[in-house]
Image (tube, rainbow, N blue to C red):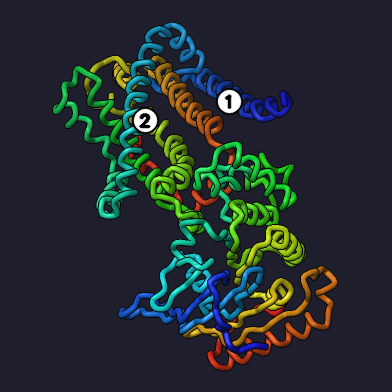
Amino acid sequence: MNNSAVVNPVPSDAVVVDGVSMVFNEGQQNQVEALGSIDLVIRPGDFVSLIGPSGCGKSTLLRLIANLLDPTAGSVLVNGKSASQARVEQDYGMAFQQSGLFEWRNVQKNIELPLELKGWSKARRRERSAEMLELVKLSDFAAHMPWQLSGGMQQRVAIARALAAHPPLLLMDEPFGALDEMTREHMQAELLRICAAAETTVVFVTHSIPEAVYLSNRVVVMSPRPGRITEIIDVDLGDDRDEDSREDDEFYARITDVREALRGADRVAGARGIEDR
Amino acid sequence: MFRKIVAAVLPPIVVGALFLGLWELIVKAFDIKPFLLPAPSAIWAELIDRSDDIIDATLNTGTNALVGLLFGVVFGVAMSFVLMRFQVANELITPLAVALNAIPIIVLVPVFNNMFSSTTEVPRRLMVTLIVFFIVMVNVAKGLRQVSPTHLELMRSYAASPTSILVKTRIPNAVPYLFTALKISAPAAVITAFVAEYFGGRQNGLGYSITSNAAASRNAASWAYVIGACTLGLIFYLVSIGLEKTLSPSDGSTQARQQQSGGLTPGGVTT
C-alpha cells in the first residue's frame, strides 16, 4: 500500500494531476465542493481505477482529466501537455456508461466518427475501422445499426470508437455499469485484452470493488465531501491475469484492502453507494 | 408476405362492407328520407355522376393543403434553427407557439379573407402554413436541442467544432422529430385547407361543395364530396408515413426517446 499520491512526476507521465480542486457554483447558495486538493500521477501502461461512494467526485476527476471541466485550482497534464491541448489533439478516447453510439450511424460509421473529425481520408478510415472491429471481434456487425446490438456489443463498439484514433490514454466512466454480471465479467476480460493489444493507459471509474481489483494495477480509493484520495492500493495480479485470477489469494486480499479503505472513508463521511459484488 | 397483407387488410374491409350493408339495410327498411341519411348506394351514384367535379374539388383543396404544408415546413424548420441558436428566442416564442396551438386559430380565416383578396387561394394557404409552421417549429427545435448529454460530451472530447456538432449530432438527432411533425401536420394541413373554405372565398373546393350541397338538401352529393375529403386526408397521411419509412433508418431508441418527451399536436384544429 502506498499513501503518497505524487511520486516525482516526470514529463513522460500519462496523467499528472497537481493540487486540483473543483468547486461547482462557487460563491452561490448551492455551492458544492466536489474535489478537495487532488494529487495523482498515472504512468504510461497503468490501469488505474477510481472507486468511491456516490458524490466522491470520481467522475468529476475523470472529466477534469478529459478537459470536459476546468478545475477551480491546480493543473492537469496529459501526455506532458495541458489537458485542453491534449483534448484538442485527441490524446485520449472516452467511454461512458451509456454507450453513446449515434443511433443514425451504423457500427462502422460510429467507430469512424473521431477519425472523420480529425479529417482522415475515407480509405484510411475504412482501414482503421476494420482493424478496430477485428480487435473487438465485431467484424461481422460493421453494417448493423446500434439498436440491433446487445448492451455488451454496444459497449465493445464504444470502446473500439474510443480507441480508433490510437490514443495513448483511455478514460472510462462506469462503462459496464448497465450490464448484467455475466456480460460484465466477460467485458472486463475483453477490455484487458484490448488494452494490452492497443498498449493503452486506462483511467477507469467504477462502483464495483471486484471490478476495480480485477482490472487495475492501482486502485484509487476516494471519499466524499469534498472528494479526495484516501488511499491508493497496488494490485499485483500480474500482466497475464485471466478468469482464474478471480480466485487468486491476491485478488481476495486486495478486495479486502479496498473494502477496508472504503469503510475508513465511510466512517469519515458517512457515505454509501458502493457495490460489494 | 401475401398472406400477411391479406391478414392485415381483410378484417377492416369485411367490417367496412358489413357496416355499409347494414347502413343500406336500415335506410331501406325504415324508409329513411334522403335528406336525413342517404343510402350508400345513393352516395355511390352521386360519386360516379359528379366524379369530374369531385376530382377537381379534391385537387383544388389538396393543392392548398400541399402548398401550405411545404411553406409551413420550410419556415418551421428555418425558425427551429433560430430557436436552437438563441435561448431568448426559444423562451419567448415556444410558450407562445404552444399557447397559439391550444386555441382554434382557424377562426382567423375571415380576417385573412379581408386582408388578402378572398378571390385568391392566399388566405387558405396562409392558414395552412401557419398551422404547420408551429407544429414543425416546436418539434424540430426540440429535436435540435434535446441531444443526449453523452453525445455532447463525446463531441467535446473530440474537440469538435460547433459546426461539426450541428451537422453530425443536432441535425441527425432532429430528423425523427421532423417526421413526427410531418405525420401530425399532413392531416392537419388537409383539415385546415378544407375547413378554411367554410369561411367563404373561392367556390372551387371540397369544403365549399360539401356545405353548399348540404344547404340545398343534396345530402347524397355532400357525402360524395366527403369521400373525396377522406381520400385526400389518407393520401397525405400515407405519403408522410412513406417518406419516413424510406428516408429515416428504422430506429427504436429515438422514437422511444421522443415519445417520452412528447410532441406537439394540433389542439386548435377541430372541425
Kindly tell me whether residue A183 is visible in this rendering. Answer: no
Q: Which of the labelled discs sits on residue B16, or is there none?
A: 1
At a point 83% along the width and 79% down the height, the residue shown is: A248
The residue indicated by pointer 2 is B189
At a point 68% along the width and 43% down the height, the residue shown is: A130
Separation of disc 1 and disc 2 at Cα?
A: 26 Å
Furthest-front residue in view? A11
Q: Is residue B187 left or right of B125 when viewed as pictured?
A: right
Q: Quadrant of residue B73?
A: top left
Type of amino acid under label 1: Gly
Q: Residues within 10 Å of mark 2 (few under 14, many from 20)?
A: many
Question: In front here: B180 or A193?
Answer: A193
Q: Is residue B175 left or right of A50 when viewed as pictured?
A: left
In the image, which is nearer the foreground, mark 1 or mark 2? Answer: 2
At a point 46% along the width and 37% down the height, the residue shown is: B179
Comes first in the chain, label 1 or label 2? 1
Q: Is residue A136 above or below residue B187?
A: below
Q: Quadrant of residue A231?
A: bottom right
Question: In front here: A70 or A180?
Answer: A70
The quadrant of the picture occupied by the C terminus of chain B is top left
Q: Is residue B66 above or below residue B107?
A: above
